[in-house]
Image (cartoon, rainbow, N blue to C red):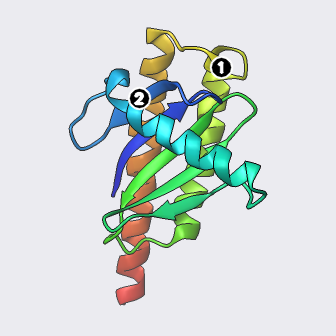
């Protein structure tokens, strides 16, 4: 299950945060996480390792994708046996959909309440649809 969605500026400022478990979108709660993600990303780029796409902790996996002006992070439980390729596909679709709402100019700084609501609506539509497809594939494989 996708637990949360973060959108951050290139400098690590949280532009949008949505916790799907708690059903909360308090951007202030995301400041520490987005700063850490940005620091890790910048360190990896500066040390010529390359831009991170996914990393894991004991409990969660973090998937990242960036546009010119914002980055999107998805957090998933590690115990979910959904392949990385499928999560990356979801992230790519989500990032594209969000890009149509935010573009490049707005998201570098802040998004307004209407845009935040559109991003939440996109997440509420795209993620459950994707989860239904995953469940259908699992059921098909059982047969």
Can residue 94 be seen from the camera position used here? no
Q: Residue furthest left?
A: 22
| Left or right of 130, for residue 42 | right
Q: Is residue 28 above or below residue 1?
A: above
Query: Which of 24 and 138 lies nearest the eye of the viewer?
Result: 24
Dot label at residue 108: 1
Q: Is residue 32 above or below residue 84?
A: above
Query: Which of 89 and 33 lies nearest the eye of the viewer?
Result: 33
Viewport quadrant of the C terminus: bottom left
Residue 137 image-quadrant placement: bottom left
**Residue lying at 67% horizontally and 54% vertically, measured from the top left:** 44
Q: How many marks?
A: 2
**Residue lying at 39% horizontally and 70% vertically, measured from the top left:** 136
User: Where's residue 42, x and y in %?
Assistant: 66, 44
**Residue lying at 38% horizontally and 77% vertically, measured from the top left:** 138
Q: Is residue 8 above or below residue 63?
A: above
Query: Which of 19 and 40 lies nearest the eye of the viewer?
Result: 40
**Residue lying at 46% horizontally and 48% vertically, measured from the top left:** 74
Judging from the image, what secondary structure is the residue with disc 1 in? helix
Viewport quadrant of the N terminus: bottom left
Residue 57 image-quadrant placement: bottom left
User: Where's residue 128, x and y in %?
Assistant: 38, 49
Query: Which of 136 and 56 lies nearest the eye of the viewer?
Result: 56
Q: Residues within 10 Å of mark 2 (few under 14, many from 20)?
A: some
Label 2 sits on residue: 31
Judging from the image, what secondary structure is the residue with disc 2 in? helix
């Amino acid at each position: 299950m996708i637990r949360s969605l973060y959108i951050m500026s290139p400098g690590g400022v949280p532009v949008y945060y949505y916790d799907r478990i708690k059903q909360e979108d308090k951007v202030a709660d995301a400041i520490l996480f987005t700063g850490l993600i940005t620091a890790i990303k910048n360190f990896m780029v500066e040390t010529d390792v390359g831009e991170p796409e996914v990393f894991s902790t004991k409990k969660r996996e973090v998937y990242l994708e960036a546009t010119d002006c914002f980055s999107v992070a998805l957090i998933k439980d590690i115990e979910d046996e959904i392949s990385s390729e499928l999560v990356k596909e979801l992230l790519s679709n989500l990032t594209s959909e969000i890009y149509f709402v935010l573009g490049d100019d707005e998201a570098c700084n802040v998004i307004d309440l209407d845009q935040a609501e559109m991003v939440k609506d996109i997440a509420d539509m795209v993620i459950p649809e994707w989860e239904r497809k995953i469940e259908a594939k699992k059921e098909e494989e059982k047969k």
